[in-house]
Each structure stands twice: as structure tokens, then as C-alpha cells.
Image: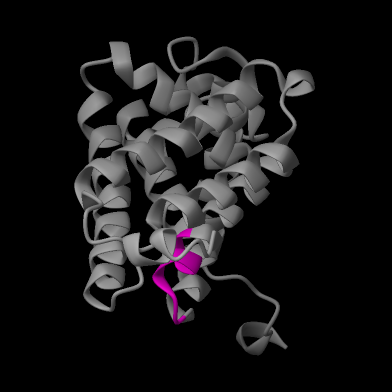
Amino acid sequence: MGNNDPTRRTQAQRSAESRTKLMLAAAELIAEKGLGGVTLAEVGERAGYSRGIANHHFGTKAALIAELVDRVEREFIEATAPASSLEVSVEELVEIASVFTGMLADLPSVHRAFLVLWATAVADEELRPRMARSDEAFRNTVEEIIERGQSRGEIDSTVGASGYAVGFLGQLRGIALQLLLAPELVDLGAARQSMEQSLRRSLQPAQAHSDGSD
């Protein structure tokens, strides 16, 4: 079969597989002991390779972290993409919240590591700008949804899109961090339901409130 063997992997495929394994190994280590205690050598060993392979693929720990954050952002955007097809803006936000809390129920290691990195960034000047950009992109998306809903008369025109986006993200991140700290004390289903109800009430047009439709 020689070079025509369809099962023969290319160098690029092997390299991509190695990078994925290294990223997953880094995520596990970050989730276990935080960013500060993780070295590239440990990442290579956890992935089942030599101590130097992570350095070969990424060069620095910062580059590895940047790729991990990029991956989490892409996965969340892909997971929430179907929400954009909903015709009602409030329901789009409800679906985004539902996807986020749904991921928390069975949290992938890279997403758990992302939350650890987010919390770490408060006191890490090098990491802080990257995580701040991630939050900003999320808030911008929420603002756009709210403004679109207001232009169609679906969302109360007095709602400040920017401020509401801050609160929306804060609720989601807060639920996630509480779950990481004490999972046995957080009823994720109840938190999800409460947030969805709050979204519908707080964004409902003022006329609907005065009509007593809630």
C-alpha cells in the first residue's frame, strides 16, 4: 500500500494530535494546582511525552495558555451559535445561559482550566489583559443581542445594554466559581431556572409589565 495507505498520518496530523494532548494535559494540571505551579516539562510528562516536547510545540507557557483560551472561546461560540437563529432576543440570551450552565454540569477540563485562569488573572498582570479581552467579547455579544431586541420592541427600551451585559456575565461566572469551590452546595438546576426567569422578567418591555402579563 505504501504511500497510498489512507491510514498513514501526515506529520501535520501527528503534530496537531500532540498539541491537543499537551493542551488537555495543561488544562488538567491547571485545574488541579493552579497556573503558577505548572511547568512545560510537567505538561509534557502528563501528556505522555518527553519533558521538552511542550517547549518544542509552544515555546512558552504563555503561548500554551493563549491557545487554550482561544480553544475555549471557539468551543463556546460554536455551542451557542444555534441560539442566534431564535427569533426572540430574550430567548437567545436564555439559551446562551442554558448552554453555559449545561457545560458546568459536565465541565470539560479545558473549560475548568479557563475558569481557574479567569480567577487567577485578577492578580496576574500578564494574564489579565487576555482574560479581560475574552470578557469584553462576551459582553459585546450580549449588548448586541439586547440592542437588537430593543430595536424590535422585544426588550424594555430603558434597559442599559452595557450594564446589563456586565451583570449577565457576572451571574454566569459567579455560578461557575461557586460550583468549583463547593459543588455539593450548588443546585445547578435551580440556579439555571432562577436565572432564566430573571432574564425574562427583567427584559420584558415596560408595557407588558403595566398590562400585568407577568
Residue 113 appears in the rendering: yes
Q: Residue at x 55, y 24 (%)?
A: 177
Quadrant of the image for the C terminus?
A: bottom right
Residue 212 within the magenta-colored segment of the rendering: no
- Measuring from the top left, give residue 111's x and y in whole percent: 55, 40
Q: Is residue 177 above or below residue 137?
A: above
- Measuring from the top left, give residue 196's x and y in whole percent: 57, 51
* Residue 55 location, quadrant: top left
Q: Is residue 21 above or below residue 121?
A: below
* Residue 93 location, quadrant: bottom left
Residue 185 relative to residue 173: left or right: right
Q: Residue at x 28, y 25 (%)?
A: 127
Q: Is residue 141 above or below residue 59?
A: below
User: Which residue occupies the foreground of this view, 143 or 61?
Assistant: 143
- Measuring from the top left, give residue 87's x and y in whole percent: 44, 82
Which residue is situated farthest in the front direction here? 211
Query: For the image shown, how many numbered marks are present on the structure?
Result: 0
* Residue 112 location, quadrant: top right
Quadrant of the image for the N terminus?
A: bottom right
Instruction: Give, as a single range, the part of the protein colored magenta.
Output: 87-93
Q: Residue at x 56, y 31 (%)?
A: 175
Q: Residue at x 59, y 56 (%)?
A: 99
User: Which residue occupies the foreground of this view, 39 or 172?
Assistant: 172
Residue 173 relative to residue 46: left or right: left
User: Which residue occupies the foreground of this view, 212 or 164?
Assistant: 212
Residue 130 relative to residue 68: left or right: left
Residue 89 within the magenta-colored segment of the rendering: yes
Residue 18 appears in the rendering: no
- Measuring from the top left, give residue 52's x and y in whole percent: 47, 28
Q: What secondary structure characterizes most of the magenta part?
A: helix
User: Which residue occupies the foreground of this view, 152 or 166?
Assistant: 152
